Image: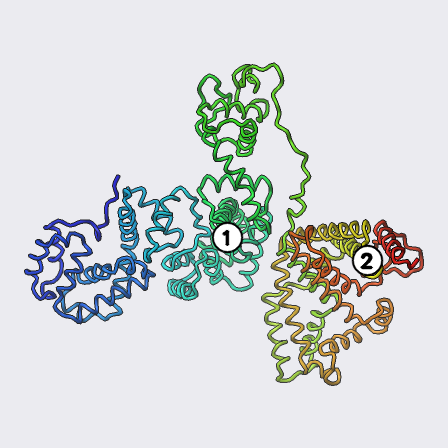
Amino acid sequence: MAYRRSIMRRPLDRDARRAEVEKIDAAIFSDRDGARDEAERDETLRTPVRIHVFIVDEVEDTGIRRKLLAAARKGIRDENGQGFLAQSPELAASFAFELMKGKSKADLESETPAQAAQRAATLFRRHRAAVFKDMIADALEARGLTAAADTVEGVFDRLDAAGTQPGGTDFADHVIDALDATGNYVTSAVTRPVKAADIRPLVGSVKALGKGRQDEIAAALAARGVVNPLAIQREAIAATLPSTAYHRLLTVAKNAISANGGASVLAVYGFDELAGAALYEALKGEAKPAEVEEETVRAAVEEFFRQNQAVLYKDRIAAVFAERYVDADAGRVDAAYELLRERRVPLNDPDFAEKLIESLPELRVYENYEPLFSTLRDSGPSAPMQDFRQPLPPGLKRSAISLLNSLNVNPDTLDNDWARAALSSVGSGGAYGSGGSGGTFSGVLGGLASPPHLPPVRMRRFEDEFTAGIEGDRIRTMARAYYIYQFDRLGIIDMVEELIARQRSFSYDLGNSPANALMSHYRQVYRIVYPAAEDRRRTFAAVFEEGPRGEASRNLLGALGEAGIDLQRVNNAGAYFSGDVGRGYSYARFRFVRAGMNLQRFLSDVGGYHMPDLVDRCWHQLHFCFSILERPEVQQYWGGRFNSGLWAVVEGLLNEAIGDSREDRRRVYGTQLTDRARTLAVFGHDLFDWLADNASTLQTAPDAEIDRGLAVLQNWLAAFRRPDTVGDWIDDDSFYDGGEDAPTDIGDEYAAEAERDALQDADML
């Protein structure tokens, strides 16, 4: 069916043109009768746009004409319609005409320009889609193409979803591109950027917000140019909750999504944004959202994520295709989704885009053979036992297609028995097709007596799985967690709590100083934002000290430390004594890389759950404490300004808190406690950060990058007295005293062998 132009663009006959003139008050014209007669005679005025330009030109009062045209242009621009004016400058006259309809000359004279512009904006919102479609139809017909109704609708949906507007010399090209892509995947409403006009309805759906507050929030979001629907929903629901309740429920939402396999989705779409949007869906209909039970919120968030998990994954696939200029039709996106999910590729995999693009040849094979399966019917000489009108499992269909491709079956064949035969072969017990002779694959292929040929299967080395599950963002979270953990063990946060307690007991007076203001502010923020001390310590102890995760953490750090020491010994031998350390270097490097990847995977595993939110809060808290302790007025409490800055305060508090036992601990460590804590915290953070930088490239990292990691590791190891074996040396509470012989491991033997070989080559032995 041909597209029918809207009322503002539909062709007009003589009577219709006459009627358009008569819609305007006669007092506005210099000569309405003459204008009406000319409109009837002039066949160039057959479109509404042309007749409207003519009518506006016939307005007697120049001031009214200019005011209406200016108001029409402003109203259209206020609705982000400047592209429409660029595409069709006469459009302003059409809306000026609409402003005059039903108004007397006195009404138009008394109306302010702002009021007229507001009316024009309302009119443009009402007619925007119709005018847009008319322009699409014009562009299609200008290229000699038929503007069918469904074609125009499909192109409009594509352009509108992509945010493409009329205007510019390339608008017609955009129309043609969209015409070619009308079967393309359309990004879901969950992540599709919204237009300014759509912000207010999103905010307005929150029942707990009054109309005035809704308008205020929507205006602020529009002014900031926020178009991400997830961010808009998060801010809208956050405005209905007290800060403590919002952060509590936000944590519940994050945990609910993570527990349902959504940690990688949170990482891609934003932890606060996606969790906030889930809260929005759970609470937008509540008059008192702060009173909703946590379990109710959790159940609603889980349901939201279950409904949208697939589309969020597919939206990411479509975005990658768009970035790489790959056609993203709906079928290809669906096939890619099934393939990547089957291979367990997380959404935030650093190589997600590369793995998706690498799958394109397989996806194209799938697309070629898909018609053989989509046209199956439960009839014919080799009708399947199962009803093929039901959707086939994607994994089964892919296996069948792989078999047909290996047999070089022509995908353009019209014989669906090939599809039935392949499904019979790969299905369990022939459940998806009976075949032609006794239900066997060989019977379908011609009654061969030999058993069916099975395609060759290569051994799986899982090389691509070595980096699966290693996520740089999670490792960076754990880098900050380790930094917080070490300084928290030193007592930085407790020291500030101690100073505040002394201040409140009238034993520590800072007067009207910046430090006093900081401590007061800290107390206020602590109650709202910072986690309880027992929660903080319990979580970090579980990761770095106690239980199965703490033990694994120490063992993996120890293994990396030992491998790094051995590699450094071999490097030193090669640098100082010989030009080739041979087998020793290769073994030491491989061992170091493998130890690093094992630690990367562990940190990725524990860096999810509630850790990003907890670490973010504790990170802020720790640096707030540093800002208090480094204040000069706090340092003066211990006798003056110290060169060592805040560490003088820390040492002073440690002296009081630890007493004589501090000397014992210093003798064991061989350094001050503050120096040791700084070394562990700073270089431990840098070590984890280096692992995050190489989350997907550690196996192939160049020697210079390995050397950078070794340098950080050596600084971190300076805080330990290392024995010659992996064991309790990495545990801060158990130290090697040198009283017994420490066994050597195989890494030490290889390193020692490399050193001996190097010395012999240099004639030094």
Asked if the residue at tag 2 contacts the one at tag 1, i.e. Cβ–Cβ closer than 8 Å, the answer is no
Of the pair 523 and 484, the residue shown nearer to us? 484
Front: mark 1 or 2:
2
Q: Is residue 637 above or below residue 332?
A: below
Residue 471, compared with residue 457, is above or below; it is below
Query: Is residue 186 something that shows in the picture?
Result: yes
Which residue is at a point 62% across and 83% down the rendered structure image? 513
The amino acid type found where label 1 is placed reads: Ala
Task: Indicate the quadrant containing the N terminus: top left, top right, bottom left or bottom right.
Answer: top left
In the image, taking residue 406 as reference, residue 721 lies left or right, namely right
Q: Secondary structure at mark 1?
A: helix
Mark 2 element type: helix
Residue 520: image quadrant is bottom right
Circle 1 residues within 10 Å: few <14, some 14–19, many ≥20:
many
Coloration mode: rainbow
Q: Which mark is residue 278?
A: 1
Q: Position of residue 268 (x, y in %)?
A: 55, 53
Residue 456: where, in percent of width, then height? 64, 29
Quarter of the image for the C terminus: give it.
bottom right
Which one is nearer the viewer's eye here, 57 or 102?
57
User: Which amino acid type is marked by label 2?
Assistant: Gly
> What is the spatial separation of the Cα atoms under label 1 and label 2, in whole angstroms?
57 Å
**Left or right: where does residue 329 sit relative to residue 628?**
left
Q: Quadrant of residue 87?
A: bottom left
The label number, if any, that marks residue 391 in the structure image = none
Which residue, given by chain and number where applicable, does mark 2 sit on?
574
| Residue 423: image location, x then y, percent | 54, 26
Residue at 78%, 68% in the rendered image: 676
